[in-house]
Image: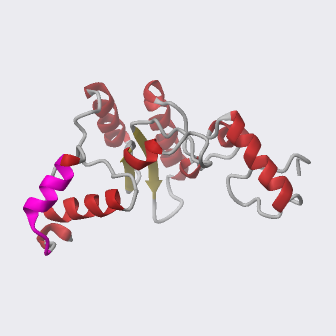
Amino acid sequence: MAEHATVALDDRRLVVELQSLGVRAISNVVDATNLALLESGQPVHAFDLDQLADETIETLLAQHAAGRAPVRELHLHQGGGAMARTPAGGTAFAHRDAAYLLNIIARSPDRQGFEEHVGWARATHQAMDPWSTGGYVNFTSEPGQDKVRASYPPDTYARLVAVKDRYDPANLFQLNQNIPPSGGR
C-alpha cells in the first residue's frame, strides 16, 4: 500500500539524521517512520539485516518455506537504541541487550490444520534456539509458568510477584501470561 506514498520532508535531512544515529536509509516513508520512532525513544523495527549471521537468515527462510499455514509470519524486531539504554532492572521488560526479537506467528481462517500450524511454530522456535538469549513474554502463546518465568530475570520476576501480592492478591487478573501472587492462587 505504501509503495506510492511519500512523506513531505526533505529526504536529505532524513538520510543525514538517520546516518548520524547509525541507521541505514531505505525510503522516505520507512526513514520518516524510523526517525519518528527513534526521536520518541522507540526501538526501530528491523529493516537492515546486515548484522544477522547468514546461517540465522538461512534458517529463518527455510523454516518459513516449510510452513503450510495460510498466513505464517516471522517478525524480526531490531533491538538496541533506547531499549538497550534503559537499565536491565528499570522495567519488567527483560533481554534489553538482545540484538533482535523474533515473533513467530501462524494464522488460519479456520481450525483446519491447526495442530500442523502450531507444530510449525514450535519447530521454528526450536530451530532458532541456538541463537536465543531468552523470550519476550508478549510473544509467548504457549501455556506454562516455565515460559512466563523464563521471560524475566529472577529479580524482575520477584518484583512482579510483589506487585501482584499488593494489587491482585486474589489473582483476579489471570487470563494472560500470568504471574501468580505468592499465595499461589
Residue 61 to residue 185: above or below: above
Q: Residue at x 29, y 38 (%)?
A: 61
Image quadrant where residue 131 sits: top left
Between 64 and 26, which is closer to the camera in this rendering?
26
Image quadrant where residue 173 sits: bottom right
Viewer can see residue 47 = yes
**16 is within the stretch colored magenta:** yes
- Residue 182, given in percent of the width and then of the height, sits at 87, 46
Q: Residue furthest right?
A: 183
Q: Residue at x 31, y 41 (%)?
A: 65
Image quadrant where residue 70 sits: bottom left
Type of colouring: secondary structure
Between 167 and 111, which is closer to the camera in this rendering?
167
Specify the segment rendered in magenta: 8-19
- Residue 96, given in percent of the width and then of the height, sits at 49, 40
How many marks on residues?
Answer: 0
Q: Residue at x 89, y 52 (%)?
A: 185
Left or right: residue 145 versus residue 153 is right
Residue 89 to residue 128: above or below: below
What secondary structure characterizes most of the magenta part? helix
- Residue 8, given in percent of the width and then of the height, sits at 13, 75
